[in-house]
Image: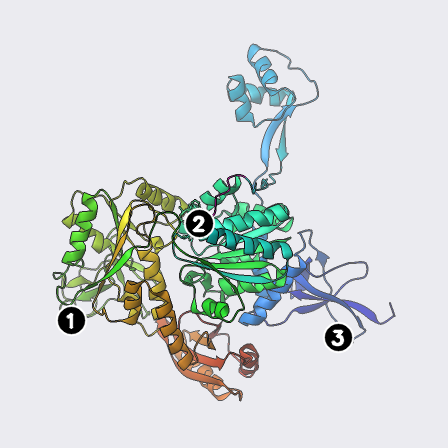
């Protein structure tokens, strides 16, 4: 090394800046990409990840030096590649992306276990019968003190006495989580021909290696889960060190899938989602990094784990909107799953009965292998779907179930079967209105109505979480007892059902009644055991579960999702209602679905009734193509927000004046964002639409570099926004 050669490392630090920070590598220190280091920043030391180490000839820049290398595990090279790619794609700060990959590591380790053991062959001064029993029960082993006392049939005081005398000692054992190797042959299923072909194709792709994406496409109940578990088994047979990631959209869904994986492979997979306690997360993080753990089931954040050898990613219910993260780092879990697979040279399987238009487009173009599962497995057939036109016989005022739906529920109960009433609205009533002045209650400084919840007796803002007791006096006109609930939520439908069928056992399944894996499991179990006759549910129960005795699905308001002007309104409604109606008739009893609607001629509802997904997709694709909207074009949204309305206006104007020249790309706005006021923050939005071959991110980078956003204004960039 020449005299003026210096070693320099670029370090990703969790700060909202687009670049890594350069530091000098002190003489004698070795660092490599992925190493975790402590670096000085102002008066503090910060944790960072080395993205690059290089030698340069003496620049006169005086760089600060890396303080030391942390003894935490190194991030695998490909994890760093992924983090950097994801930051570029979403226009996020790479240091903040890297920080997402370190999440589990920041948790405390589980407490070490305390056990007692003999000290050499020391004998007690007074060998009582109790003391002898303890020493015999212990032998040469170590045991937790309470277990030892129990095994010897003595009180814990006896063990303590021996500890005090120095005959026994306490030792601490670090808990290293054991993740037993899954057994691919533990409980194999006999696949039908379509399933076997799919598992063959995926298994083949995994063992050949290289990036290979698939769409696994089959109606609900066709056995997609069974097929991808078999593919996972083949991957493990070909390479016992292979790691497999199964991404699921929601926790409520996790439990059932975890049980199936456990049954299939004889061991439970590692879980990674917000319900997992931090010390456990740390164990999973370390086991994944060290390659000691084969199967991870998780939420979208599991994409950021430091896999040692990731061979297969499965995204189940790939169309699901909850894969999109909109707070903090803004990204779509499905899109990043495909990117991660590409970087890991791995196979990725997107599974759905109602794939997103983006994924279908990729399959049509031949970019994704298209694996189709034909019919429902075994004797189960898809439910018959009928539209119930509400116009000729509307429900009575203040009720929501029409006569034909009531009759169908009654018949179902008579046969000893179960009904599910689907309404994608939490709480009792979506709006509370003053009968005297027409005022609608909203959360403070927020453009969002308060929803009445009767179980908790509160009015809740679903956007901000604000809640209050229901006032007796209208806050607008002062009238007394004038506030009335308007419209139905699941709680109100359950009330109606209980009045109509007083002997039926009813329950509500929503994110209010099912808050974690445990409560989800309990409710799903009582449904499966036939302890519930009528389940009233939001989308929380629309997918993933198999209820053999459920034969009737009633959709209370099939028009609900179709009203908004959102880009994906039709697509989302089609997917949701297909999933909801698909709950009926999963076993040997045929199912039936009734959709209450005021607009039976709507193409989405017509396609649902005809069971004709292709017709829906064709019509919707044609509309998107005509407007050059996704998947035919791309979108990005810029959301500005601040408590200072003037500051938002100013930045919005500056952005509008700084738009770079670009072809086949348009900018719309600034305009009020769909929610123009949230928690007192004014929100403005600019939208970009570009043809597919335009470098959208490049355009955004140039644009944003031209405008200085003051600290009082937050700028959120959403590339490929999910809602629009
Ligand atoms: P999907 O994931 O497509 O909704 P599942 O994999 O959950 O479908 O399968 C639906 C039901 O059929 C489940 O109860 C599953 O255990 C059963 N099943 C699917 N394939 C098979 C098979 N090859 N052998 C036995 N049972 C199967």
> Residue 140 appears at what percent x and percent y?
65, 22
Colouring method of the image: rainbow
Q: Which residue is drawn at 53% across and 65% down?
A: 368
Vertical order, 25 against 535 (above or below): below
The residue that label 2 is drawn on is 254
Residue 536 is one of the magenta-drawn residues: no
> Considering the image in quadrants, where does the N terminus appear?
bottom right
* Circle nearer the viewer, 1 or 2: 2
Question: Farthest residue toward the right?
Answer: 2
Upstream in sequence: badge 1 or badge 3: 3
Vertical order, 415 against 385 (above or below): above
Vertical order, 16 against 266 (above or below): below
Element on which disc 2 rests: helix
Q: Give the range drawn in magenta.
A: 186-191
Element on which disc 3 rests: loop
Q: Is residue 159 left or right of 167 when viewed as pictured?
A: left
* Circle nearer the viewer, 2 or 3: 2
Mark 1, other Cα within 10 Å: few <14 / some 14–19 / many ≥20: some
Q: Is residue 594 left or right of 638 when viewed as pictured?
A: left
Residue 464 showing in the rendered view: no
Alpha carbon distance from label 1 to label 2? 46 Å
Alpha carbon distance from label 1 to label 3? 69 Å
Mark 2, other Cα within 10 Å: few <14 / some 14–19 / many ≥20: many
The residue that label 1 is drawn on is 437
Vertical order, 668 against 436 (above or below): below
Upstream in sequence: badge 2 or badge 3: 3
Element on which disc 1 rests: loop
> Considering the image in quadrants, where does the C terminus appear?
bottom left
Q: Are marks 2 and 3 in contact (CB under 8 Å)?
A: no
The residue that label 3 is drawn on is 61
> Residue 575 appears at what percent x and percent y?
36, 63
């Amino acid at each position: 090394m020449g005299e003026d050669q210096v070693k320099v490392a670029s370090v990703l630090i969790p700060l909202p800046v687009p670049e890594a920070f350069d530091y000098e590598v002190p003489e004698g220190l070795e660092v490599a990409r992925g190493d975790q280091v402590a670096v000085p920043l102002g008066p503090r030391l910060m944790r960072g990840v080395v993205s690059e180490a290089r030698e340069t000839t003496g620049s006169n820049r005086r760089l600060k030096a890396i303080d030391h290398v942390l003894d935490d595990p190194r991030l695998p090279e490909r994890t760093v590649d992924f983090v950097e790619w994801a930051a570029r794609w979403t226009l996020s700060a790479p240091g903040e992306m890297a920080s997402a990959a370190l999440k589990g590591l920041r948790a405390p380790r589980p407490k070490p276990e305390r056990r007692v053991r003999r000290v050499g062959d020391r004998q007690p001064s007074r060998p009582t019968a109790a003391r002898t029993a303890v020493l015999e029960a212990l032998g040469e082993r170590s045991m937790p003190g309470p277990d030892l006392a129990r095994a010897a049939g003595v009180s814990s005081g006896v063990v303590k006495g021996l500890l005090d005398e120095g005959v026994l000692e306490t030792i601490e054992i670090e808990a290293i989580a054991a993740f037993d190797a899954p057994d691919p042959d533990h409980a194999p299923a006999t696949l039908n021909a379509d399933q076997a072909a799919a598992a063959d194709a995926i298994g083949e792709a995994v063992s050949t290696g290289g990036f290979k994406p698939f769409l696994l496409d089959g109606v609900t109940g066709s056995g997609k889960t069974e097929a991808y578990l078999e593919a996972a088994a083949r991957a493990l047979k070909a390479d016992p060190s292979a790691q497999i990631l199964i991404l699921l959209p929601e926790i409520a869904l996790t439990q059932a899938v975890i049980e199936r994986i456990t049954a299939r492979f004889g061991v439970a997979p590692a879980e990674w989602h917000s319900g997992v306690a931090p010390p456990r997360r740390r164990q999973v993080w370390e086991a994944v990094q060290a390659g000691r753990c084969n199967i991870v089931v998780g939420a979208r954040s599991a994409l950021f784990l430091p896999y040692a050898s990731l061979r297969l990613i499965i995204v189940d219910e790939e169309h699901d909107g909850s894969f999109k993260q909109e707070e903090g780092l803004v990204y779509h879990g499905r899109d990043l799953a495909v990117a991660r697979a590409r970087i890991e040279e791995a196979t990725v399987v997107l599974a759905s009965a109602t794939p997103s238009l983006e994924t279908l487009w990729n399959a049509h173009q031949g970019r994704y292998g298209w694996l189709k599962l034909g019919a429902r497995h075994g004797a189960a057939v898809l439910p018959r779907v009928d539209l119930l036109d509400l116009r000729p016989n509307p429900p009575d005022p203040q009720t929501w179930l029409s006569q034909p739906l009531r009759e169908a529920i009654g018949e179902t109960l008579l046969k000893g079967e179960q009904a599910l009433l689907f309404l994608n609205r939490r709480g009792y009533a979506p709006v509370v209105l003053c009968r005297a002045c027409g005022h609608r209650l909203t959360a403070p400084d927020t453009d969002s109505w308060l929803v009445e919840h009767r179980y908790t007796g509160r009015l809740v803002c679903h956007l901000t979480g604000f809640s209050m007791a229901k006032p007796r006096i209208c806050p607008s006109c002062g009238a007394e007892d004038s506030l009335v609930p308007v419209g139905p939520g699941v709680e109100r439908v359950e009330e109606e059902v209980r009045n109509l069928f007083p002997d039926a056992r009813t329950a509500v399944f929503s994110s209010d009644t099912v808050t974690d894996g445990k409560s989800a499991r309990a409710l799903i179990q009582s449904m499966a055991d036939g302890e519930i006759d009528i389940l009233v549910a939001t989308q929380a129960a629309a997918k993933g579960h198999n209820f053999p005795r459920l034969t009737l699905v009633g959709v209370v308001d099939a028009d609900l999702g179709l009203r908004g002007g959102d880009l994906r309104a039709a697509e989302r409604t089609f997917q949701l209602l297909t999933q909801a109606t698909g709950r009926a008739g999963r076993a040997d009893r045929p199912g039936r679905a009734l959709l209450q609607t005021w607009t039976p001629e709507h193409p989405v509802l017509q396609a649902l009734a005809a069971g004709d997904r292709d017709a829906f997709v064709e019509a919707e694709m044609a509309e998107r193509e005509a407007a050059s909207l996704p998947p035919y074009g791309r979108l990005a949204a810029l959301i500005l927000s601040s408590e200072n309305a003037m500051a938002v206006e100013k930045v919005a104007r500056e952005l509008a004046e700084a738009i770079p020249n670009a072809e086949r790309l348009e900018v719309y706005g600034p305009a009020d964002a769909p929610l123009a006021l949230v928690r007192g923050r004014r929100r403005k939005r600019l939208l970009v639409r570009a043809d597919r071959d335009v470098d959208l991110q490049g355009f955004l980078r140039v644009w944003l570099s031209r405008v200085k956003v003051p600290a009082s204004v937050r700028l959120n960039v959403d590339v490929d926004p999910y809602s629009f």
